[in-house]
Image (cartoon, rainbow, N blue to C red):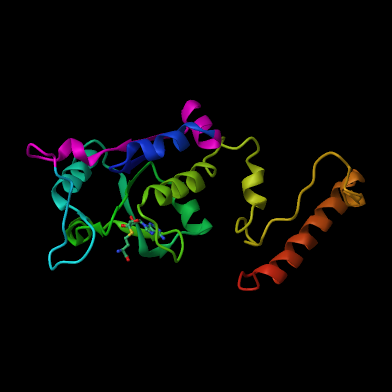
Amino acid sequence: MRIDIITLFPEAVRGYLDASIVGRARRRGLLEAAPVDPRQWAGGRHRVVDDRPYGGGPGMVLAAPPIASCIEALQSRSSRMRLLMTSPQGRPLDQAWASELAQEQHLAVICGHYEGVDERINEIYRPEEFSIGDFVLSGGELAALVLTDAVTRLLPGALGHDESAVSDSFSGDEAQLDHPCYTRPVEFNGMRVPDVLLSGDHAKIEAWRREQRELRTAARRPDLKG
Ligand code: SAH
């Protein structure tokens, strides 16, 4: 799987791509992910990548030409690229969509900044716009990293145990919230780990966990099916 993150702020994404599960997946060769800076394709002496909005108003808009050249350069190197764009106006990213994207060979994610991206990029390349929630960020870098992380942990071999991705919240057939978990010490602040988890009885443990998933989902997210 390859993920290109098209961003004016490559330094904002590099650290995350090096760390933890995403970094390990890259080192294991499961994931190739890197920032791509559209400035490389910006023409003129000043390499302009953004400009004031036509019609007036505050802020800056990412200009179409360098983004278009960048998309085309990436497409020319790969026939199977699926193009996405970060946007608070996009389709909400969820676990089902992340699983679908994890089947792809190559994703490219455009990060907007400031006011957004010249609308003609949408009209020409029809990127799939995704949102990570009903709030506004200054730029798409965090959203692109959210997508990268959610997709990477679904790649076979990226987690220590592949089954842990199946019982995670929103995953598997039931798409419920996950059960609570405990580790040592067995007693903390006068509170003991539930006895069933210490029983060694795997059928009982699984039944307890299933019940906990149902209770939590009903209490916290009754909108989820389950
Ligand atoms: N004026 C735009 C917001 C621009 S925010 C509007 O109101 O719709 C600047 C950039 O940050 C966006 O282009 C997008 O790339 C990113 N961004 C902001 N909020 C986001 C969100 N909730 N999900 C995904 N990307 C977001």
Q: Is residue 221 magenta?
A: no
Q: Does residue 175 appear left or right of residue 152 in this picture?
A: right
Q: Which residues are magenta?
A: 20-47
Residue sitting farthest toward the front: 58
| Quarter of image, res 38 | top left
Give the image location of residue 221, x and y in percent. Answer: 64, 69
Q: Is residue 2 visible?
A: no
Q: Residue at x 20, y 61 (%)?
A: 119
Give the image location of residue 44, x and y in percent. Answer: 7, 39
Q: Residue at x 23, y 60 (%)?
A: 122
Q: Does residue 124 appear left or right of residue 19 in this picture?
A: left
Q: Residue at x 13, y 48 (%)?
A: 65
The C terminus - image quarter:
bottom right
Give the image location of residue 36, x and y in percent. Answer: 29, 37
- Ligand 1 appears in which quadrant? bottom left
Vertically, is 128 above or below 197? below
Vertically, is 218 above or below 79? below
Give the image location of residue 212, x and y in percent. Answer: 78, 61
Q: Residue at x 38, y 47 (%)?
A: 141
